[in-house]
Amino acid sequence: MRNMAILRSLLYFILAGLCEIGGGYLVWLWVREGKNGWHRAEYFD
């Protein structure tokens, strides 16, 4: 039971790391393109 908790914690840690890297990459793309962010709002109309 304790081993399962450790494995689950490691899985969450790795998943959070991947999400952090992915989010940072998306922000980098946004800054690199020089867009202000409001251009995405047109997709929700």
Image (cartoon, helix red, strand yellow):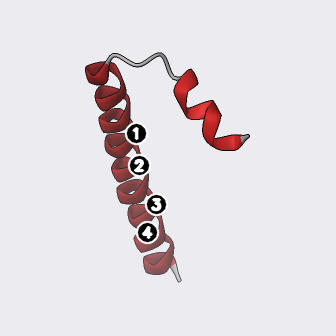
Question: Dot 3: few (<14), some (14–19), or many (≥20) neighbours within 10 Å?
Answer: few
Q: Which residue is mark 4?
A: 6
Residue at image coords 29%, 23%? 33
Q: Is residue 16 left or right of residue 32?
A: right
Q: Which residue is mark 1?
A: 23
Q: Amino acid at mark 4?
A: Ile
10 or 1: nearer the eye?
A: 10
Mark found first going from the N terminus, 3 or 1: 3
Q: Are marks 3 and 2 in contact (CB under 8 Å)?
A: no
45 or 3: nearer the eye?
A: 45
Q: Is residue 29 left or right of residue 16?
A: left
Q: Amino acid at mark 1?
A: Gly
Q: Which residue is mark 2?
A: 19
Mark found first going from the N terminus, 4 or 2: 4
Q: Are marks 2 and 1 in contact (CB under 8 Å)?
A: yes
Cα–Cα gap, marks 3 and 4: 10 Å
Q: Which mark is residue 12?
A: 3
Q: Amino acid at mark 3?
A: Tyr
Cα–Cα gap, marks 3 and 1: 16 Å
